[in-house]
Amino acid sequence: MENRTKAIKLIAEDLKTINPDDYPDIKEELLALSEGIERANQFLETIREIKALIPQALQELNLKTDEQYRKELNYSKVDVDELLANEDEDFDKLLALELALEKYSLNKAGLFSKGRKEISLLVKHSEDLIKRKDELFELIINKMMPTISRHINLIHLKKGDISALREITSFPILLDKNEKCYIKIDGVGLYEDVAVRDTIGGISGFSFRIAKGVSYRIGGFKAKGESHMEKRMVDKGIFYVTSKRYIYDGSAKNIDSELEDILSVEAYSNCIKISRSNKRDEIFVGNANWEYVGTVISGIVKNTKG
């Protein structure tokens, strides 16, 4: 079948493992996708039936030579044989071949001149099938699947299934054997708790007036220091997630930590907070889908721990 139908088959298999009631926020989209795939499968079944009937029709027409094929159908025998043998079905060519066979059958039966209505209906039938195909694939492949696929991938990730993660192959960091890189984000700011010292003080002693509007103070300035923790950006660099580690490659600071050492991950729309034992919390801020990054990290950890 075409690549698009393979994609539909894969997404249909995924949908079988998911109960829409468990995901109320995307339930309607999941149900709509299931309905669209069912319609697509009905169309594919029609194509399979057509394909199964073509050899029988060719046998009845008794076309033996390549010359006869070209003359009667405008197809070479090799083209027809390849079309029937190929598992990657070309819908338009199959429907066009079916129409050519029907036209030739009517012509051979002497109905060509009298059967304009039959020909017109056959053409309309083929055009309707092609239109249905285009509408279905436009709806499923281009509009529904990209969004729903992301949701389905997240569902699988949350369960620890990382098979849908795409591996990144171009990066400067060195990986261990069998280690794979899944996420690379440029321009990420690293925020950490920094101790900020505040100076608090005032004037001490006493003063006396020496002229109108002028006074003199005896004593001095006394100050004391207090400090508090404040989140500040300490570096900017590249953030990576691999099958084993999360890595931060900054201009002044580098972080290389095993994912299993993470205590918690909190993802927000513009950042992610990672907590490790006996370490300051790290907040990574940048232009990325951090909720997805957090899910990837959690999914890999869950997958590793089995």
Image (tube, rainbow, N blue to C red):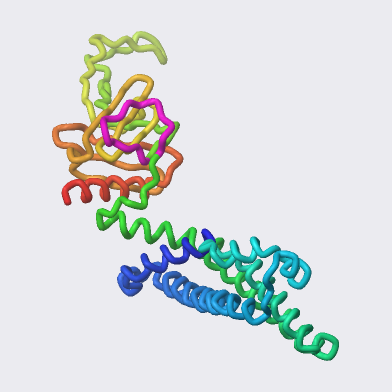
Name the outermost residue toward the right. 113
Question: Relative to the observer, which residue lies in front, 201 or 20?
Answer: 20
Question: Relative to the observer, which residue lies in front, 58 or 146?
Answer: 58
The percent position of residue 103, horizontal first and vertical second, equals: 75, 80
Segment colored magenta = 168-182
Quadrant of res 290: top left
| Up-down relation of residue 100 to residue 93 (above or below) | below
The percent position of residue 93, horizontal first and vertical second, equals: 65, 67
| Up-down relation of residue 269 to residue 24 (above or below) | above
Question: Relative to the observer, which residue lies in front, 184 or 97?
Answer: 97
Is residue 17 covered in magenta? no
Residue at 23%, 18% in the rendered image: 223
The percent position of residue 95, horizontal first and vertical second, equals: 65, 73
Quadrant of res 224: top left
Could you tell me what secondary structure mostly forms the magenta stretch? loop
Question: Relative to the observer, which residue lies in front, 14 or 118?
Answer: 118
Q: How many marks?
A: 0
Residue at 32%, 26% in the rendered image: 174
Name the outermost residue toward the front. 64
Residue at 28%, 47% in the rendered image: 266
Residue 93 appears in the rendering: yes
Lateral position of residue 116 relative to residue 46, left or right:
right
Lateral position of residue 47 relative to residue 272, left or right:
right
Is residue 174 covered in magenta? yes
Name the outermost residue toward the left. 278
Residue at 76%, 88% in the rendered image: 109
| Up-down relation of residue 164 to residue 211 (above or below) | below
Residue 193 appears in the rendering: no
The percent position of residue 86, horizontal first and vertical second, equals: 54, 62
